[in-house]
Image (tube, rainbow, N blue to C red):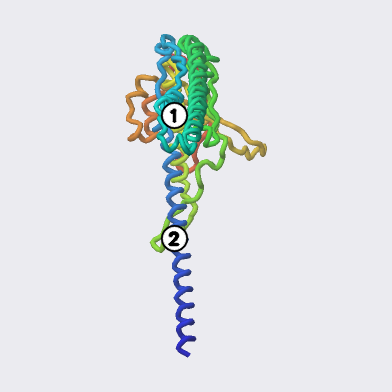
């Protein structure tokens, strides 16, 4: 009977321990999911805080090509020095150990030769890659400096200026460059880029979800749109020498009157380099910061964006 009671006790303790472990794993999973959601929501309205490093194309035109590696053989030299310095003792000479030691040292020489060749091949591969990039940049620089549209498109693609935005399902294109102004189109293709539900971690460690209030949803959507526009302008200024960036943002939506998807422009902004670079990007509210620039936006807190006209570089109020 005593043995039976002990086995029952052990079984109950095992079940209790397993249950606690499952609860802790569930709590950790819920906390991770809540944190992931919070990080994502924050990221939606802070895309503008990052940017590519500035490119100095004048410096590129005057840069020298990378230096070709010089073939060296330090491993072989060290191994041959070991061969030359080897002096077998009397016992090695008598019992044949000298030949074995000599053979091992000669093998080390061959390994040294192979290692030197491997290092040289790696250095040459790295050199060829750097040389290819240098040639491409030097050939591209004059076109970028003269604001040739195709050269600027190539430069933006080369540095991956809009890769992060593309990761959100947003497509950015450079439409045209006139004088010192570049016009970009930004298409937010993902209709569900902004979540319609809120996810929170309760005091009990369980997740709770509820529909996001319309005002909160559209405020987040507005900040995301503005953040995208600012990021595009920042990338344009980092990679090209333009002074003005015009960004027309479009969003995919269903037209209930036709049943077809449409892409109306919901924000059009004319950024100027001097004004944009003076902003403290880590502290601004993206939507509020648009007040610093001429822009078109029709926005209602409870229903979101209405269509506006694209902005162009030849409009008098833009070029003035």
Do residues under tags 1 and 2 come within 8 Å of each other at their CB atoms? no
On the question of residue 234 being in view, the answer is no
Which residue occupies 62% across, 37% down? 255
Q: Position of residue 176 (x, y in %)?
A: 53, 16
Alpha carbons under labels 1 and 2: distance apart = 37 Å
Badge 1 element? helix
Instruction: Pick whichever, 279 or 24, lies toward us.
Output: 24
Q: Residue at x 46, y 58 (%)?
A: 207
The residue tagged with tag 2: helix, strand or loop? helix
CA neighbours of label 1 inside 10 A, class few (<14), some (14 to 19), many (20+): many
- In the image, 253 versus 29, the foreground residue is 29
Query: Across the whole image, how many numbered discs are drawn on residues?
Result: 2
Residue that mark 2 sits on: 27
Location of residue 197 in the rendering, given as x and y in whole percent from the top left corner = 49, 50
Identified at 55% across, 30% down, the residue is: 171
Q: Residues within 10 Å of mark 2 (few under 14, many from 20)?
A: some
The residue lying toward the viewer, choosing from 311 and 194, is 194
> Above or below — where is 30 with respect to 6?
above
The residue where tag 1 is placed is 231
């Amino acid at each position: 009977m005593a043995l039976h009671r002990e086995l029952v006790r052990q079984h109950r303790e095992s079940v209790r321990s397993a249950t606690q472990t499952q609860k802790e794993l569930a709590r950790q999973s819920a906390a991770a999911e809540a944190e992931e959601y919070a990080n994502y929501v924050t990221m939606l309205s802070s895309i503008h805080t990052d940017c590519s490093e500035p490119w100095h194309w004048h410096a590129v035109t005057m840069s020298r090509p990378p230096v070709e590696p010089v073939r060296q053989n330090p491993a072989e030299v060290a191994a041959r020095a070991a061969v030359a310095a080897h002096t077998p003792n009397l016992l090695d000479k008598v019992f044949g150990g000298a030949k074995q030691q000599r053979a091992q040292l000669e093998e080390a020489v061959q390994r040294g030769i192979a290692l030197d060749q491997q290092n040289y091949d790696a250095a040459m591969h790295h050199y060829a890659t750097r040389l290819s990039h240098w040639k491409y940049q030097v050939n591209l620089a004059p076109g970028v400096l003269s604001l040739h549209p195709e050269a600027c498109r190539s430069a933006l693609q080369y540095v991956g200026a809009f890769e992060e935005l593309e990761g959100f399902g947003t497509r950015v294109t450079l439409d045209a460059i006139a004088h010192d102004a570049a016009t970009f189109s930004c298409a937010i293709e993902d209709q569900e880029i902004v979540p319609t539900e809120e996810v929170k971690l309760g005091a009990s460690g369980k997740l709770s979800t509820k529909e996001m209030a319309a005002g909160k949803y559209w405020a987040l959507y507005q900040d995301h749109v503005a953040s995208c526009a600012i990021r595009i302008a920042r990338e344009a200024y980092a990679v090209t020498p333009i002074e003005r960036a015009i960004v027309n943002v479009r969003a995919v939506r269903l037209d209930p009157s036709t049943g077809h998807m449409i892409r109306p422009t919901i924000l059009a902004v004319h950024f100027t380099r001097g004004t944009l670079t003076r902003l403290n990007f880590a502290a601004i509210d993206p939507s509020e910061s648009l007040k610093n620039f001429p822009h078109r936006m029709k926005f209602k807190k409870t229903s979101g964006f209405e269509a506006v006209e694209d902005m162009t570089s030849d409009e008098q109020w833009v070029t003035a």
